[in-house]
Amino acid sequence: MVTADLQSVNGDRHLRPKHHADPVTPKQGAATRASMRREFDTSLGGAPRVELLGGGVAVLELAPMLFPLEWAAEPLGAALTLASRAQALILDLRANRGGAPDTVAFVCGYLLDERTHLNTMYWRGGERGDPCDGWTVHPHLEVTVPVGRAVNPVSGTNWEGTGVQPDIPCAAADSLDHAHTLALARLAG
């Protein structure tokens, strides 16, 4: 209820209380960073799946998020390099919650042929790192507060809470099979 009340102010899902079972340090952002590091360590650095499907099509899952670049450059670079040998690539982002802007640019650098304006970052109080900060308000409770947001150069808006609409809509459960079929058809044609 508290989360819903907080988010009703601006609709930003980064604004939320986070309960931690173990006591957390009062240092700003430390609890969120430690939780993020545990997710990083259990997800192969944010690339839990690289697989070659039939017909020379690779699938690369980027989940649960794109972690800070200083952590993620090595595992993501390895996964993208491995997948680069495929004839086609499917990026599976269904379980991805977002991520660090520098890491998004890093991944796009492997995928785009030319320099591309991805986003303009708006920062409250000047330029910085992650678009969210955490404050410990109780030994087991941290509140995360958005301090920046991405502004898309095409739409002029942020996709927070709405995501990116697919070019070809289909049910999430069917999307990998559908993408594989489309990739095979494109390779054949």
Image: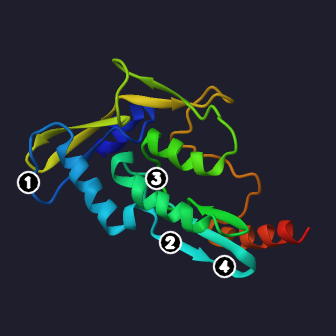
Q: CA distance from mark 4 to mark 3?
A: 25 Å
Q: CA distance from mark 1 to mark 3?
A: 25 Å
Judged by depth in the image, the label closer to the viewer, 3 or 2, is: 2
Q: Position of residue 145 (x, y in %)?
A: 30, 34
Amino acid type of the residue that numbered disc 4 sits on in the rendered structure: Leu
Q: Position of residue 92 (x, y in %)?
A: 58, 63
Which residue is identified by label 1?
Answer: 23
Q: Position of residue 85 (x, y in %)?
A: 65, 68
Compare marks 1 and 2 and give the one earlier in the sequence: 1
Q: CA distance from mark 3 to mark 2?
A: 16 Å
- Residue at the right extreme of this rendering: 189
Q: Are marks 1 and 2 in contact (CB under 8 Å)?
A: no
Which residue is identified by label 4?
Answer: 53
User: Residue at position x 63%, y 25% from top?
Assistant: 156
Q: Is residue 39 left or right of residue 117?
A: left
Q: Is 95 or 58 nearer to us in this picture?
A: 58
Q: Are marks 4 and 2 in contact (CB under 8 Å)?
A: no
Secondary structure found at label 2? strand
Q: CA distance from mark 1 to mark 2?
A: 33 Å
Which residue is identified by label 2?
Answer: 49
Q: Is 22 or 99 nearer to us in this picture?
A: 99
Q: Total number of numbered labels? A: 4
Compare marks 1 and 3 and give the one earlier in the sequence: 1
